[in-house]
Image: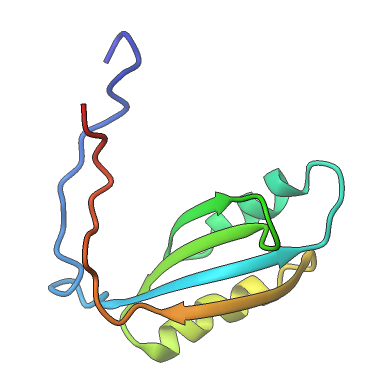
Amino acid sequence: EKMGFIEGCYAKLNPEKLGKSFIGVTLVRARYSPGYHETVGEKISKIPGVMAVYFVFGDTDFVVISRAANRDELMSIVEQMMKIEEIERTSTMIVAKVIKEDMRIQI
């Protein structure tokens, strides 16, 4: 930890057992302004249910991964994103089946 390689230790929880079986992958397009990726990304990251926010290159500005209990809760997460004034458009996909989900870094 002192060298900075380990940032923390976490328990791997079962999302289905916790009632969070819906996964949304949302592509977000935002209005450009200097430093927008920091401000918009920070606003998105504060929405409950948002698990990951990635600033990416291409036609999409952000990829957002969310977990929710059901379709209505997922829709609420997306609606909260749409309330952010810099966000122009979103496109959300619901994950049908998780094939692999492992964020550990292989060394």
Nearer-the-camera pick, 58 or 1: 58
Give the total of numbered labels: 0
Q: Residue at x 51, y 62 (%)?
A: 64
* 48 left or right, relative to 82: left
Q: Tell me which colouring the rendered structure shows.
A: rainbow
Q: Residue furthest top?
A: 3
Q: Is residue 66 above or below residue 55?
A: below
Q: Residue at x 61, y 50 (%)?
A: 56
Q: Residue 98's x, y, as percent?
A: 24, 70
Q: Is residue 106 above or below residue 34?
A: above
Q: Residue furthest front?
A: 58
* 64 left or right, relative to 82: left
Q: Residue 62's x, y, as percent?
A: 61, 58
Query: Quarter holding the C terminus?
Result: top left
* 104 left or right, relative to 23: left
Q: Quadrant of residue 14?
A: bottom left
Q: Residue at x 60, y 81 (%)?
A: 79
Query: Quarter holding the N terminus?
Result: top left
* 97 left or right, relative to 29: left
Nearer-the-camera pick, 43 or 35: 35
Nearer-the-camera pick, 78 or 62: 62
Q: Residue at x 27, y 31 (%)?
A: 8
Q: Residue furthest right?
A: 33
Q: Is residue 4 above or below residue 38?
A: above
